[in-house]
Image: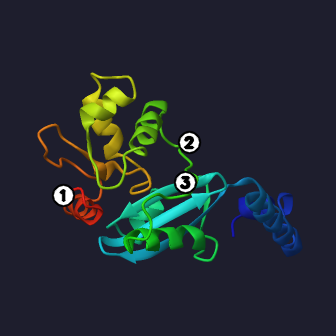
Amino acid sequence: MNNLEEHLDHLLPAPPESAVTASLAQVQTWFAETVPLIRWASLETPVGRLYFASGESGVTNVEIGISETTFLSRLDPLAHAEQNSDALRAITTQFREYFDHQRSRFEVALDLTSVSAFQRRVLEAISQIPVGTVWTYAEVARAIGRPSASRAVGHALSTNPVLILAPCHRVIASDGSLRGYKAGLNVKQHLLQFEGAL
């Protein structure tokens, strides 16, 4: 140890271990009380593993066919993510009923605070599309009062954070082709066949 280090040690002594422990406890308490909590779970389905997450205001994310790591990376980075199947049992039950043909509408609140106002309007509009039917991107654009915004509607749907709950798989091109789907065209086709739209 050189003279400068010895001098600094006298000026800045290490804090007692009890102080460090107390400070850490304060930070953890602050984190628990301040940072939002997002609970998540997963479920095996006919179209692959489905991951979903919910905060205090409702479901924030639903993804299909991605890894757990990728799913967790898409959650709110400022939130504390906690795997908790028990807390999400009601949502899990509704997904199981949907895939067992026992449910056609979901009764869950959606938290769409992470999306733009335009995307929120698009997702709210497509939530009105009945099971077994499809709309075109142009029809969705007209439904939100923006008849020339078909391309913008397509972009909004390509980043839909709550797949199935906001059923963007029920939106197709004007020529009848399926076009893009965040979870892959094979999943989109499977869901439409499963719902009786194809």
Kindly report the distance in space between the C-alpha atoms of the residues bearing marks 1 and 2.
33 Å
* 25 lies above or below 177: below
Category of crowding for the residue at label 3, using alpha-carbon neighbours closer than 10 angstroms: few (below 14), some (14–19), many (at least 20): few
Is label 1 in contact with label 2 (beta carbons under 8 Å)?
no
Question: Disc 3 designates what residue?
Answer: 77
Residue 198, label in figure = 1
- SS assignment at label 3: loop
Tag 1: residue type?
Leu
Q: Which residue is depicted at the point 82% across and 72% down?
A: 21
Kindly report the distance in space between the C-alpha atoms of the residues bearing marks 2 and 3.
14 Å
Q: Which residue is depicted at the point 39% across and 48% down?
A: 160
Category of crowding for the residue at label 1, using alpha-carbon neighbours closer than 10 angstroms: few (below 14), some (14–19), many (at least 20): few
Question: Disc 2 designates what residue?
Answer: 113
Between discs 3 and 1, the one toward the N terminus: 3
Is label 2 in contact with label 3 (beta carbons under 8 Å)?
no
Please tell me in which quadrant of the rendered image residue 96 appears.
Answer: bottom left
- SS assignment at label 2: loop
Between discs 2 and 3, the one toward the N terminus: 3
Between discs 1 and 2, the one toward the N terminus: 2
Q: Which residue is depicted at the point 88% across and 74% down?
A: 18
In the image, residue 72 lies at what x, y percent? Answer: 47, 64
Taking the image as shown, residue 56 lies to the left or right of residue 154, namely right
Category of crowding for the residue at label 2, using alpha-carbon neighbours closer than 10 angstroms: few (below 14), some (14–19), many (at least 20): few
In the image, residue 3 lies at what x, y percent? Answer: 73, 62
Q: Could you say which is closer to the camera, residue 26 or residue 167?
A: 167
